[in-house]
Image (cartoon, rainbow, N blue to C red):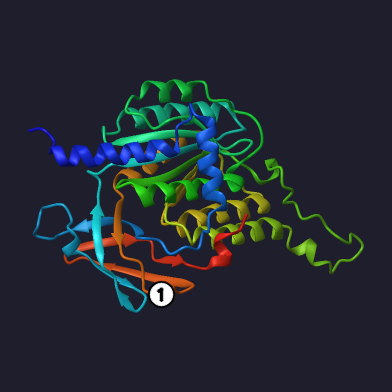
Amino acid sequence: MGENRSVVTVRSTSWKVAEMFLRASERVVWLGVFVALWIAPAWAQPDTLRIPFWIQADVSASGQALSPEEIKVQLGVETGQVRQVLGPEDGTLILLIADLSGSLTSAQLAKTALKKNIDELPAHTRVALLRAQDGLRVLVDPGPERGPLLEALDSLQVSGRAGLLETIQPAVRLGDAILAKAAVRVSVLYVTDSEVGNYREDFTNPTINSSDSGDLSRRFRDGLVRDRIARLDASLAATQTPVFIVHLNYRTDPLNQAYQTGLMTLASTTGGNAWFCRSQPEIGAAIGEAFSAIASQYSLVVEPPSEPLPKSLEVSLESPGRTLAWRSRFSFNKAARTER
């Protein structure tokens, strides 16, 4: 049986809106949209709040797709009004961001796994390929044809400086702009081999006074990276697009452990997740798990809380017969959203 014509029309319109933001062939348009998003008042009240969630277990008797009437939302002290529930059968846009500058072998394993998972995606899922080195750049638009995307992955360069921390905020802001205009689910997926010493910014926090055994910089060598992560975390709490991170090379030195813990925090704050590969054979499975998490994501579209907006909003969801996992905190802090 053919797909309902109204559903096809809605999806077509949504993809046109999404593609407007990501038309790589028109760099001036892309840059103009990006700059407009970057300088726009980030604290304006959103028309809707998008809450990502997952159904972990379902013993309900309905056997049907989850409807707005079947889910209860609590936004702080208010009961939320559900406008729409988007699920795995609805349109999905993945902003796939490559941040690769290390091992060629690990990068090739990641490319192979990415191509496999992209080949298996349903038609209603589209993928835009971006690169994080030297600023966020669009390499391939999210079109219906997979060929250009797979070819771009094959030829993707593995070079330069790490770029995740420098691009995560504009990437999520781009996702939010699409969420605000299109009835699709949007996720940011980073595939990275970044290590803290490969950033242009120096996070090493050198000892200030080498002759003073009590110098605090001796004890808190990870202070700079923790501070950077904390500021980004406060900023991302005020956004709505979930971030998923697959890190290809887990490192055990204290500075990189602080960095990797920070990446887990950033992903969790947005409602996403992070995977860290301790060996190259784990890369394929980690990328597969990331795609599975994105595919099974639901997006709850609710009315925002009443003004004045709280600085921090606790969210809870409930659906009879279902065990849910969801993003539980959002921020409306004006100062936090303007972190650069």
Q: Residue at x 20, y 62 (%)?
A: 322
Residue 19 on image: x %, y %: 39, 36
Expressed as whole percent of the image width and height from the top left, the position of residue 298 reads 29, 52
Q: Name the spot of residue 194 as percent of width and height, x first.
A: 60, 41
The type of residue carrying mark 1 is: Glu
Q: Secondary structure at mark 1?
A: loop
213 lies above or below 244 = below
Residue at x 61% of width, y 39% of height: 135
Between residue 43 and residue 337, name the one nearer to us: 43
| Quarter of the image with the C terminus in it | bottom right
Quadrant in which the N terminus appears = top left
* Disc 1: which residue: 307
Q: Is residue 92 above or below residue 302?
A: above
Give left or right: position of 181 versus 202.
left
Q: Position of residue 57 (x, y in %)?
A: 22, 57
Image height of 33 relative to 157, above or below: below
Q: Which residue is depicted at the point 48% across and 53% down? A: 267
Q: Looking at the rendering, which quadrant does residue 294 occupy? A: top left
Q: Nearer the viewer, residue 293 or 169?
A: 169
Q: For residue 304, what is the image quadrant?
A: bottom left
Residue sitting nearer the eye, 18 or 197: 18
Count the marks.
1
The answer to whether one can see residue 247 in this image is: no
- From the viewer's perspective, is 30 left or right of 61? right
